[in-house]
């Protein structure tokens, strides 16, 4: 854990130096403040619509930031040959991959938490409601971004940033399209084996209800551990086969 922790801290420090995080954070803050002025609000549904728009905005910002951070992390270090100095310090390749993922997950968790705090501030001054339920949505997004980062890192151990970005976006689409891609009468029911990301989609209960039950939160954590673990294992296998 000591070596992985050091790698994670280095990833966090390097990520915080990048302007993209602060640009996205500023953009999200401005857009969140604008949401209450959007037209077509139904009477009595203002807070629900606000939460739905805010969750969508934070999700898009998180995906953009995750791709910006993960797509070129390992390929860039391989190109700059800094990965050689890291692995030369008795750091195992699996520690390097997992430590990189942990660092990026820490950055994303902080970013989503900051987004959620901004949403709360806007909600409090606009509706006199701090909307604590938004933190359930934030947790779901952090867990999903953990899976997305694991996918991006696994691909980046073998391919360049363009392939990583395209493949990760494709993975997001496939992960949220189970009912469309695997369905229909007469089709083989592969749904139990489909790596769906819909487990993290709690936009409706967070926006228009009181959130989800604790058992569902536990289910999300189980899906997060399973999918992230499988993808990181794949990334470690790719990294082991890479000629460095």
Image: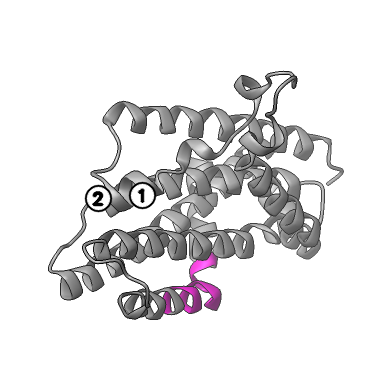
Percent x, y of residue 99 = 56, 45
Q: Would you call the spot at circle 1 few (<14 residues within 10 Å), some (14-19), or many (20 or more)?
A: many
28 w.r.t. 131: above or below? below
Display colour scheme: one colour
Residues shaded magenta: 15-26
Q: Left or right: 42 with respect to 224?
A: left
At a point 72% along the width and 60% down the height, the residue shown is 77
Q: Left or right: 207 with respect to 31?
A: left
Tell me the distance, in whole angstroms, between the alpha carbons under discs 1 and 2: 7 Å
Asked if marks 1 and 2 touch (Cβ < 8 Å), the reply is yes
Residue that label 2 marks: 133
Residue that label 1 marks: 137
22 w.r.t. 174: above or below? below
At a point 40% along the width and 59% down the height, the residue shown is 55
Judge by depth and name the residue closer to the eye, 3 or 54.
Answer: 54
At a point 31% along the width and 48% down the height, the residue shown is 206
Q: Main secondary structure of the magenta part?
A: helix
Q: Left or right: 40 with respect to 148?
A: left
Q: How many marks?
A: 2
């Amino acid at each position: 854990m000591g070596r992985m922790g050091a790698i994670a801290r280095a990833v966090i420090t390097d990520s915080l130096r990048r302007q993209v995080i602060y640009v996205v954070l500023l953009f999200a803050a401005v857009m969140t403040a604008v949401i209450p002025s959007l037209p077509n609000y139904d009477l009595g549904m203002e807070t629900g619509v606000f939460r739905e728009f805010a969750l969508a905005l934070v999700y898009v910002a998180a995906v953009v930031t995750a791709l910006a951070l993960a797509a070129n992390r390992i390929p860039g270090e391989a190109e700059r040959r800094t990965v050689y100095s890291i692995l030369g310090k008795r750091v195992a390749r699996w520690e390097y991959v997992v430590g990189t993922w942990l660092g990026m997950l820490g950055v994303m968790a902080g970013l989503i938490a900051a987004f959620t705090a901004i949403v709360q501030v806007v909600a409090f001054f606009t509706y006199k409601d701090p909307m604590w339920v938004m933190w359930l949505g934030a947790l779901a997004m952090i867990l999903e971004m953990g899976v997305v980062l694991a996918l991006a890192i696994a691909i980046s151990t073998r391919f360049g940033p363009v392939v990583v970005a395209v493949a990760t976006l494709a993975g997001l689409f496939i992960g949220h399209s189970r009912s469309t891609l695997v369905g229909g009468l007469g089709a083989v029911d592969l749904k139990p084996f489909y790596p769906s990301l819909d487990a993290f989609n709690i936009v409706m209960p967070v926006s228009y209800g009181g959130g989800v039950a604790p058992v569902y939160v536990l289910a999300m954590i189980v899906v997060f551990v399973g999918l992230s673990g499988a993808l990181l294992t794949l990334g470690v296998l790719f990294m082991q086969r890479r000629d460095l």
